Image: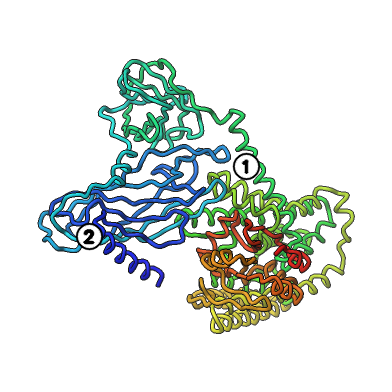
Amino acid sequence: MRFLFARLLTVLAVLLALGAGQPGFAQVTTENAIKTALVAETRAPAPGDSFTIAIRMRPDQGWHGYWLNPGEAGLSDSFEWTLPEGVTIGELRYPVPERLVIGGIMNYVYEGEYALLADVTLAEDIAPGTAVPLRASGQWLACTDEICVPESGDLALDLRVGSGGAEASEQFDAWRASLPRPLGSEARFEVADGTLRIAIPFPAEAGIAAPYFFSATDRVLDYSAGQRVSRNGDTLIVEVAAAGDAATIGRIEGLLKIGDHDGLLLTAAPGDVPAAGTVIADAQRLDSPAMNAGIGTILLALGGAIVGGMLLNIMPCVFPILSLKALSLAKAGGSASGARQDALAYTAGVVLVCLGLGAALLTLRASGAAAGWAFQLQDPRMILFLLLLVTAVALNLAGLFELPSLVGGGRLAGRDGATGSFFTGALAAFIATPCTGPFMAAALGAALVVPPVVAMVIFGGLGLGLALPFLALAYVPALRDRLPKPGPWMERFRHLMAIPMFLTALALGWVLGRQTGVNGMTLGIAAALGIALALWWAGSRQVAGKRVWPPIVPAAMIAVAALFAVPGDMLSAPGNEVEAGVLDAEPFDEARLSELRAEGRPVFAYFTADWCITCKANEAGALARADVAEHFAAHDVAVLVGDWTTGDARIGRFLESHGRTGVPLYLYYAPGEEPEILPQILTPGRLTSLPS
């Protein structure tokens, strides 16, 4: 419906443009940080004519878009055209970009309004009066200095074949003036001693200011390195540290900036480059003091990830898997070598899962999806998978069957259980990381704006922090000596710890029901019961000394069939109604937020998900309290709740605009004030002390 409404607005805008005698214009109504529109220089192109269209990009204050080569970070734009028969379109032409260094990372960006131009050509046999609908589906990246959000939109413009001739347009004149001009001669380049040297024909008498070479060809130069530009007669010499493919590539394309919004498009082929001449510019390098602050920012983000991972060990969202960790800690009371072996295996499982989740998140965002941390729990199939896995783990802890005969590893509570410790760590990370505790928010926000290699280091730091207490127990004898000695109590403790795992399975079943309805929840319960029966059969065969594989085959078949059969239509879809509760909450909407703030009312906005245990603990322990509801009612505090259970892209963008990649997030808007970000662990006293 939203896209249909946007198309109706498109037609209305075209009609208004036709009536006003202005260039054809169609605005796409979106909530993107970079607003886009498709604009044509003529309303009525003639048969056989070529005319110019523009994709106008308007970043909100503090946001920026990217050049065709974004530099060390970011993504280039992507537009797919749908054109009627007899209509062709040329390549998009980008204006001269600017440089932006964030955290020591070089970006090629546009911080104000800009436009991408292209030439459209009509066939000569198109009849006058024929409708010419131009359609494009685009994806682009919008960023601030702290966060990046993949955005997308559909562009539409309706023209009609007429008499031709472009209307005078200062707007198009300004956009053309920002385009780089083609260089008349071919440039040459060579790689010598790790330096890329480019010789660019340029008249000795021509003026030039602050020259800089933007490479459209990737992996030929070090983006962050300084560029030395000198003049040798009628040739400019650009020297910069070479990268990856520079020595083997046969062609380099790029743009030489020669002034403010002025540049030259060029192509360089391998050839001799003369000696450097009189230096015009020697750009600042990353090893200068001004750039070192960026390295400090990255180290701060890494430190935040490690500390945040450590704090996850005490966050409520980790409680369901504390039983597994408790058994692993108990094993550390044995030999030092066994404790270290288990600790390293546990750490490997934690770190590998964090790296895997981080890589998947970066891949999804690179594809244009508005994914955030905990994206894996927004898919009901993953919730069902976890439900079945946790059910199997609970039955193992209860003693229904033993793990060694199934996977060939040590017993989960045994001393030689490196395999069990690895999978314990993997499960711990998979369930624990969706919660974003203190220190993690800034670290995960930074991970989405730095190069992928640096981002992966931050994700690895999160896993290391989660495993760090276990490592400390394994490698610090004084701490390990304080743990109880292994003994018969461990078996009783193991059986007792099956209880929280069964409660976790129950909670996952509830989440599955919230996402897919009664049918999905029934399917999940039936699959869990089927697997329980198969594992009970396996345990019986273990006691009798028989092979256990016959029961495992039907258990695996049940799991696979259930994953394929889980309903795909999710009831908790974006925009779905929320329960008002004692706070009389409304569904979150940015327009509603702006309306309430314009009325001068204080607003409490919180963002939650059914699978977030921290969120549910806060809702039960603080947000459901009568004294909090009375305080909010007495001070006319409006409450908005954003449900991110199924990954609403609008809520994802809003979270990221506040430097967060996941839930919970609690914001309080006092009248006329900027929002206050509240702690992720709420107390009734904190809520009743909010200013009105």
Name the image quarter holding residue 103. top right
Q: Secondary structure at mark 2?
A: strand
Name the image quarter holding residue 47. bottom left
Q: Which residue is identified by label 1?
A: 298
Colour approach in the figure: rainbow
Q: How many marks?
A: 2
Q: Which residue shows up at 51% across the image and 64% down it? A: 650
Viewer-nearest residue: 382 or 442: 442
Q: Which residue is identified by label 2?
A: 159
Q: Nearer the viewer, mark 2 or mark 1?
A: 2
| Residue 300 in view (yes/no) | yes
**Dot placed on the residue nearer the N-terminal end, 2 or 1:** 2
Is 444 situated above or below 570?
above
Quadrant the C terminus occupies: bottom right
Is 106 situated above or below 28?
above
Give the amino acid at mark 2: Leu
Q: Secondary structure at mark 1?
A: helix
Residue 689 - label: none
- Return the x and y of residue 231 as percentages of the image width and height: 38, 18
Viewer-nearest residue: 592 or 462: 592
Distance from label 2 to label 1 (Cα)? 50 Å
Q: Which residue shows up at 33% across the image and 32% down it? A: 264
- Return the x and y of residue 504 as percentages of the image width and height: 69, 73
- Return the x and y of residue 564 as percentages of the image width and height: 49, 75
Left or right: where 157 falls relative to 323: left
Give the amino acid at mark 1: Ile
